[in-house]
Amino acid sequence: MIAWNSDTARHLLARCLFGYTRSDLSKALSYASISDFVSKELLADIPQPAPVNSWVTETPIANNGAVNSLRYKELTTWWLNRMLTENTSMQEKMVLFWHNHFVSDRAKVSYPQHMYQQNALFRTHAFGDFRQFTKDVTINPAMLIYLDGQRSNKNAPNENYGRELMELFTLGIGNYTETDVKEAALALTGWSVNGLNTVFTKSNFADKNKTFLGKTGNFTYSDIVDIILTKDAAAEFICRKLYKEFVFYMPNEVFVRQMAGVFRSAHYSVRAVLQFLLTSDEFFKPEYRGSKIKSPTELVIGTLKFLGITKPDFEYLADTSAMLQQYLFSPPNVAGWPGQRNWISSNTYPARAGYSDSLVNGRKGNGQTLSFKVLPIDYARSYTSAEDAPLFVRDVIAQLLIIPPSAMKEKLLLDTLLDGTIAANWSTSTPMADARIQKLLKAVMRLPEFQLT
Amino acid sequence: MKRKEFLRQLSLLTSGVAFGVQGVPVRTYAHNPFMLETAGTNGNILVLVQLQGGNDGLNTVVPYENSIYYQRRPTIAIPKAGVLPLTSQLGLNPAMSSFRELYDNAQLTIVENVGYQSPNRSHFRSTDIWLSGSDAETLEYDGWVGRYLAHKFPDYPVSLPEQPLAIQLGSVESMLLQSPVGSMATVFESPDTFYQLVQGNSAESASVPNTVAGEELKFLQQMAAQSIQYSDIIKKKADSGKNVVGYPNTSLGKQLAIVADLISGGLTTPVYLTTLSGFDTHANQVVASNVTTGQHANLLKTVADAVAVFTKDLKRQNLANRVTVMTFSEFGRRVNQNGTTGTDHGTAAPLFVVGNSVRGGIVGTPPDLNNLDSNGDLNFKNDFRQVYASVLRDHLGVDAINTKTILGRDFETLPIFRQNSALEVTEGIFALGQNTPNPFVNNTDIQFTLKQASNARLVVYDLAGREVLVLREGQFDVGNYNIHFSGTSLAAGHYLYSLQTDFGRQVRRMVKV
């Protein structure tokens, strides 16, 4: 039985949400058990949001580049806003997980309507039935465009989708042959995109027997998905990915197989396997706490929640996330963002610090003023310990960092706040207290520990 | 990669500011008494150009006399009339006219049919195989260049060399530069913004918890230390270096301009990695109405133009002799075109090696379209690690034993570089070889080999004993060195050249005609 306390609650929130506020934490702890909180809050069915704008149903028109680019901006900021205001539902976390799984790229799909449609599909199926989900994705317009399904036909099948469906979306490499790729490509023919709709044209479909993963028949795309899901490798592949997202990037294969067993016996219900994972001993093992390197969206949104900023400039957030190599609606390639250490290079590491600085300074790195920033005195006074410097520093650290810094670093942080005076003289009413609080916040968020969650 | 977008945003967010945090040590590594010199290398530089997505080799180096090529690719084959012929069988895609000039000057070697046994057609797996230099069935987690650097800098990361071991232009670190002792790369998009970004970061290696989370923290601390360590010298070298020709305004052009600038500024970093993506041409590889145009042609032009300008830039600055450029891609594409004026994933393909020290010409035979595998793909002829072995031995001066360690086993080298058999030391500690060709008209090569690390000075004298040219001077590691030099400034006649080492001196004679 895992204890439900502020340590375990913080770990659960940190992994399932894009950061959390202090009130999210109290709310979590108001539930009697982990399992209650997971089922009634994190995995609860919540109403689907209203579309980003009425243009989502407009039939795409060619050569509309400037308009499209504005709409993408609108779509991206809308999504980031949802991540910031999701409260204690993990729906948006799963939407991003699926975006990173069933990858499509705005650069090739081009119409924002299609990318919105796909984003909405991910939301509908966020916790849903993986079988139906995979079938729907297969003939989703954005996907038909991105992996060339719309261009494939019985006479000249294009292997792009057939290969990635197995390699990256369901089975993983090594669980199919080159012949399976070719046969799947045949079964997937006939589908194309007309405006916002998917169209099946029978005359383009390879209406004949295919031999796929050892079975023979006149298979359609739906049969292909069903046959794939008869293989144990499929559930293991998805569970491994969930494990890497929510627990640790090096999977515990024994546990992954347990998850896969749960996933299969729950008829591929994503909600069921998440409920199992998020209440498991494995998930809460102390050694995994603080072992995940924040993704750019986790950093960008989570820092705002930590600092109590509710009205940010979402375009700035979108630009920052892209600069930190998570350009929403445009993963680097069909395998998505690999995550963890891949987020960090000698280029992006310092850029992360530039972002956290900017929230405190109220200025971008280039000196441009931001429309929002932390109000240092208000922020400090939101802690009951605000007037006791050593305690205040400890509380800030406890909220912002999962791995406590060394005593030496903590001392350095306290010195930063005191700026030459002694602890007894500290008060949030002293002159320059705001500047010192700013320095403290910047210094804490520049620690390597801040990048971990 | 969204490079253009990234640069735009980077400048939006960061230009012109130094981040500073009082109370936290800034730039603790400004000077490190344990710094290593990059003396562990022979001074030669390798610039890699990764073509991401799988470059279509058959439409790059076109078998323009092969009727099967035209049968299998009825609407995307490059017509014979458009090809830039190199031999009676092979010619370049017309978009690569700037490579034609390099080829004519023997500065471009094409290695045909490069691949490996049991080819994998997954982008991700095949990229890993190319980067790690492993067999198709073996999983490795570090890169062949990372292992080369770990061999060259055995004290890393206990002490950090003064200059970066390897530079990658980009933002997401490549497996190529991972070694068993961690990351060897400094990764950035531009020297200036890199410098500004790291100001204010603290590098501190306090003890970390002994847990998996502690491992991640250690990794972050190392990244912090590395970025601080190198931002300074990179900025300094970029400021003192220059480009003397204009580069094309393309992603690759910009990357190579930075590389040339840093080399010109005197950075001794031995390896650079640049990348160009977009080669996954499943659809609309060519424009149906005009097959010599389209996505693939644009990409090939980008590569050829950027590399050619880079070569010219270095040549004008007298830096070309030490630098070799090599392209690679995870696979070629299927012989048959698909139904969407494109090609699906395939296997073997040609690659390019460019520089003053290459032999020029084509290594290998034209692709054999009569003998395809069961998927309708080419069978490879030259193992990609033979190319790596050639680069390691003949360009970077690694000896046979260490090359074998780096690549896991022995691979025969290919005749890519001008002098491909290493001079052996038969007596004593070092050897100085006879220049080839001799007599020479303008260009000749001199080899020497050291069995122990030493200071070395390679000088040309006239018969009156006056120093005419200093070819090399400095600290050299154990290895075989091939020094190319251009004697255009010398009058015809007899000359001596001498190698002075810590173990003595040898002198040989040569003739310019």
Image: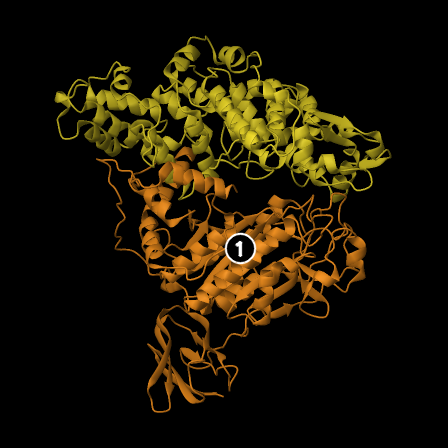
Chain colours: A yellow, B orange
Residue type at the position of mark 1: Val
User: Disc 1 on helix, strand or loop?
Assistant: strand
Please state if B113 lies on the left or on the right of A308 as rendered: right
State the count of labels. Answer: 1
Q: Is residue A127 above or below residue A32?
A: below
Q: In this view of the protein, which residue sits in the foreground, B70 or B423?
A: B70
Q: Is residue A287 visible?
A: no
**B23 displayed left or right of A312:** left
Res A349 quadrant in image: top left
For the residue carrying disc 1, how many other residues have a C-alpha within 10 Å: few (<14), some (14-19), or many (20+)?
Answer: many
Residue A160 position in % (x across, y down): 70, 40
Q: Nearer the viewer, residue A263 or B372?
A: B372
Where residue B245 sits, quadrant-wise, is bottom left
Q: Position of residue A29 (x, y in %)?
A: 41, 11
Q: Tell me which chain the residue with mark 1 is part of.
A: B
In the image: residue B208, left or right of residue B77: left
The answer to whether B46 is drawn above or below residue A331 in the figure is below
The answer to whether A380 is drawn above or below residue A323 in the figure is above
Position in image of residue A407 (x %, y %): 25, 31
Query: Is A445 located above or below residue A349 in the figure?
Result: above
Examine the rendering and report whether any part of residue A336 can be seen: yes
In the image shown, does B33 or A257 lie closer to the viewer?
B33
Q: Residue A49: percent from the left, percent from the top?
A: 56, 15
Disc 1 designates what residue? Answer: B49
Furthest-right residue in view? A208
